[in-house]
């Protein structure tokens, strides 16, 4: 493994781990607040799965000598995170413990965008030149169909529902579209990743994502304005919002006070 | 006892280990056991996780180590998890399918291929007049259903095949 290959691999693994980790956390903040009890069960299961996927990638980083996987998730500064900014943004006004006024339309669109992308990325990673990553992707992708189906069902139903639902969904769509480009970015090491066969190229999965999302948009008669943007910066290069720092300090509070307390 | 004999005994012992999230079925019947090897009394067991993010893996590993350590002649136990090959529901043995049913969980179709519809029989009355109440159940591997014939709610193990190359439709 050349130093260049290793750097690109580690950058990629952080993108994979951090995406799943931070979105699973945002999802878990919906516990008890979703529109109905069945959704609570389903959403919790999806979040638990995504957190499990993050753990797999953090473990690969540990195996590469990056440090203990729990430390990687909980003790790095925000600038070391490589998740897409779209995934770290707060669920809406308020806090989980204090008057949460979360936006379900935003949750549906954000998760739908992410899970369409996650499927495309996993299918590309099945052919990764790093064998442990290819094997893990081959397994995770078998479970992805259920997540995708879940969010697509919500997306289509709310888009075809009442005028109010449509209005709220379109608002969420423009918010998510403005940062969807960060999801598709591979960051400054992207060209090296693709060159070494670690992933597909950024252009390839951008095309695939646009095509898949375009099909769903066509189904519900929606036309986006312009290209997916990076309104809040490129998280793959360590650019983040204050929302990430806040989330990480909540997530790591117990672990920082007593690392033993988080064991099973 | 020689290593070959030990290997048989270790495999037998593993049939007593259950997935804590599916207590009715042992890990061998569930198809989680990929390989067992014994070299000079040192056992090495490779398991395939059913779901990649399964939080029960640590517990299963602990249980496997404790169980195999009690086999006479075994001096050391190593357990590794692998995604290669990926576990699919096709690995569940016929006995495993019966064990699931007895526990009140409908087994997944024996030979699920990408794009196949999911055909489920009620584990209580065998009726196929059932509705999916929630694709997501109490654990990652189970869904919640309702039998229109005997009016019982029940759970079913989700089929896991190599389905994700195709985009499923939600209808
Ligand atoms: Zn029945």
Image (cartoon, coloured by chain):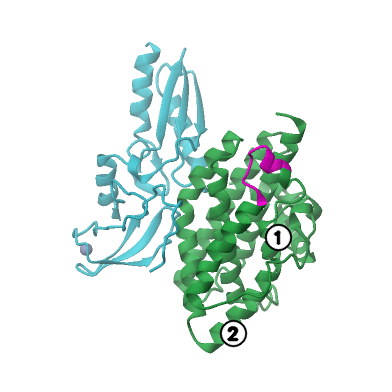
Chain colours: A green, B cyan
Q: Residue drawn 68% across and 66% down?
A: A228
Judge from the rendering whether residue A185 lies leftward or rightward of residue B16; answer left or right: right
Which element type, helix, strand or loop, lies under badge 2?
helix
Which element type, helix, strand or loop, lies under badge 1?
helix
Residue A64 sits in quarter = top right
x and y percentages locating residue A10 in the rendered image: 71, 41
Q: Residue drawn 24% across and 58% down?
A: B121
* Neighbourhood count class around disc 2 (C-alpha, 10 Å): few under 14, some 14–19, many 20 upward: some
Q: Are marks 1 and 2 in contact (CB under 8 Å)?
A: no
Query: Where ligand 1 lies, by image quadrant?
Result: bottom left
Task: Tell me, for residue A182, which label it has, or none.
Answer: 1
Relative to the observer, which residue lies in front, A86 or A124? Answer: A124
Judge from the rendering whether residue A216 lies leftward or rightward of residue A99; answer left or right: left
Residue B140 sits in quarter = bottom left
Asked if residue A253 is positioned above or below residue A94 in the image, the reply reads above
Residue at mark 2: A167
Asked if residue A248 is positioned above or below residue A8 in the image, the reply reads below
Asked if residue A32 is positioned above or below residue A211 in the image, the reply reads below
Identify the chain of the residue marked 1, using the numbered disc in the image: A
Q: Residue drawn 55% across and 53% down?
A: A120
Quarter of the image for the C terminus of chain B: give it.
Answer: bottom left
Please check the rendered image and state whether residue A199 is part of the magenta-colored stretch, yes or no: yes
Residue B5 visible, this orientation: yes
x and y percentages locating residue B156 in the rendered image: 33, 56
Q: Please state the extent of the stretch shown in magenta in the rendering.
A: A192-202
Residue furthest bottom as drawn: A163
């Amino acid at each position: 493994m050349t130093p260049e290959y290793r750097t690109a691999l580690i950058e990629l693994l952080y993108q994979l781990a951090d995406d799943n980790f931070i979105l699973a956390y945002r999802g878990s903040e919906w516990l008890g607040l979703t529109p109905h009890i069945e959704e609570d069960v389903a959403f919790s299961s999806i979040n638990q799965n995504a957190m499990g996927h993050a753990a797999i990638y953090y473990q690969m980083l540990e195996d590469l000598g990056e440090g203990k996987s729990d430390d990687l998730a909980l003790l790095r500064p925000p600038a070391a995170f490589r998740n897409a900014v779209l995934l770290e943004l707060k669920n809406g006004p308020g806090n989980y413990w204090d008057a949460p006024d979360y936006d379900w339309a935003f949750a549906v669109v954000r998760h739908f965008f992410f899970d369409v992308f996650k499927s495309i990325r996993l299918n590309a990673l099945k052919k990764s030149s790093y064998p442990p990553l290819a094997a893990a992707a081959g397994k995770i992708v078998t479970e992805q169909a259920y997540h995708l189906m879940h969010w697509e069902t919500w997306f289509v139903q709310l888009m075809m529902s009442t005028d109010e639902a449509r209005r709220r969904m379109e608002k969420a769509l423009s918010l998510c579209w403005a940062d969807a480009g960060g999801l598709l970015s591979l960051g400054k090491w992207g060209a090296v990743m693709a060159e070494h066969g670690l992933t597909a190229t950024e252009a390839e999965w951008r095309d695939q994502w646009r095509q898949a999302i375009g099909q769903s948009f066509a189904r519900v008669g929606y036309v986006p304005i312009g290209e997916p943007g990076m309104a809040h910066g490129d998280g793959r290069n360590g650019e983040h919002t204050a929302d990430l720092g806040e989330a990480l300090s909540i997530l790591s509070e117990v672990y920082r006070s007593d690392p033993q307390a988080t064991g099973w | 006892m020689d290593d070959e004999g030990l290997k048989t005994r270790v495999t037998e012992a593993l049939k007593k280990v259950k997935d804590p999230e599916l207590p009715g079925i042992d890990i061998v019947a569930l198809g989680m056991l990929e390989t067992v090897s014994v070299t000079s009394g040192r056992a090495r067991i490779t398991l395939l996780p059913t779901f990649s993010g399964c939080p029960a893996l640590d517990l299963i590993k602990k249980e496997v180590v404790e169980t195999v350590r009690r086999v006479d002649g075994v001096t050391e136990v190593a357990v590794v998890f692998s995604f290669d090959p990926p576990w699919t529901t096709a690995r569940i043995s016929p006995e495993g399918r019966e064990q699931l049913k007895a526990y009140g969980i409908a087994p997944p179709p024996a030979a699920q291929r990408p794009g196949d519809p999911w055909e489920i029989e009620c584990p209580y009355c065998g009726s196929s007049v059932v509705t999916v109440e929630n694709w997501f159940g109490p654990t990652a591997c189970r869904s919640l259903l309702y039998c229109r014939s005997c009016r019982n709610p029940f759970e079913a193990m989700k089929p896991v095949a190599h389905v994700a190359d195709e985009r499923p439709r939600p209808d």
